């Protein structure tokens, strides 16, 4: 009997997440969408994450190891190329985003209305942890600049939770190695004419003490990427 094709491929880029990775995997496995494929791309972790991953023996989990740290965008590119599900979703390896919301997030694609779905941390009535003011301001400015050049009306361009029809995301040549993935992919799916939806999600943000990695340099790079992939790429 032929193996059942998964509905969902969950792509988890991972770098030094020993404190959360096992709990996150359990939450993904317990998420309401099945069958699913879980692809963990360890991007050169040095904190013991790899030792934990090497002990995992579950049929639907595919672990890919980068020999050195290249960046989130590079890890996602690796993961997308290994995806076999009809839909692919990005899941950070920390616990900021709740896998229990997968069915809600991918519903516009399953219903045939969307090609891409963004999960917005700034919409809806779901709980949102209150964290950094200037991060919120920066996120709003980046989303505004992106919207001005793509002519779409997202509220959260920088969100981790993005779901794609797998054939679409696999067809895109991802150039950015780090957090520039977010503005790059937003520009490219917009230019492709994809049907983009946005749904409100919960958000359990973490602090730098908890292990948050993105910083102001990534914000500067994001501005560069917004201009590069919207203006100069044309």
Image: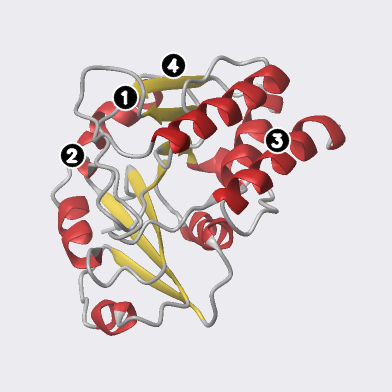
Instruction: Name the residue: 39% across, 39% down.
Output: 161
Q: Earlier in the sequence, mark 3 or mark 1?
A: 1
Q: Nearer the viewer, residue 109 or 89?
A: 89
| Mark in the foreground, 2 or 4 | 2
Q: Is residue 69 above or below residue 85?
A: below
Q: In terms of depth relative to the viewer, which is nearer, 108 or 177? A: 177
Q: Quadrant of residue 226?
A: top right
Under tag 3, what secondary structure?
Answer: helix
Whether residue 172 is visible here, answered yes or no, is no
> Which percent across, then down, holds residue 40?
37, 65
- Measure how far apart labels 3 and 4 are at the Cα level: 26 Å
Alpha-carbon span between mark 4 and mark 1 = 9 Å
Upstream in sequence: badge 4 or badge 1: 1
Q: Toward which corner of the image does residue 105 lie, by quadrant?
A: top left
Label whose residue precedes the other's in the sequence (1 or 2)? 2
Image spot of residue 209 (x, y percent)? 30, 60
The circle on residue 194 is none
Q: Secondary structure at mark 1?
A: helix
Which of discs 1 and 2 lies nearer the camera? The answer is 2
């Amino acid at each position: 009997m032929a193996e059942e094709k998964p509905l969902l491929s969950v792509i988890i880029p991972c770098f030094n997440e020993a404190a959360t990775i096992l709990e996150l995997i359990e939450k993904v496995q317990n998420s309401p969408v099945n069958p699913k494929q879980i692809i963990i791309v360890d991007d050169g972790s040095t904190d013991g994450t790899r030792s934990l991953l090497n002990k995992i023996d579950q049929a639907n989990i595919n672990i890919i190891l980068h020999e050195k740290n290249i960046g989130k965008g590079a890890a996602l590119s690796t993961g997308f190329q290994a995806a076999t599900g009809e839909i692919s979703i990005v899941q950070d390896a920390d616990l900021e985003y709740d896998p229990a919301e997968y069915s809600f997030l991918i519903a516009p694609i399953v219903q045939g209305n969307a090609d891409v779905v963004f999960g917005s941390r700034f919409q809806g009535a779901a709980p949102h942890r209150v964290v950094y003011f200037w991060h919120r301001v920066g996120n709003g400015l980046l989303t505004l600049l992106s919207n001005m050049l793509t002519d779409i009306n997202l509220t959260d361009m920088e969100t981790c939770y993005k779901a794609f029809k797998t054939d679409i995301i696999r067809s895109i040549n991802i150039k950015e190695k780090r957090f520039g993935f977010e503005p790059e992919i937003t520009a490219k799916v917009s230019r492709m004419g994809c049907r983009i939806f946005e749904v409100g999600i919960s958000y359990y943000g973490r602090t730098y003490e908890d292990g948050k990695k993105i910083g102001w340099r990534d914000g500067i790079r994001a501005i560069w990427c917004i201009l590069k992939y919207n203006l100069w790429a044309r």
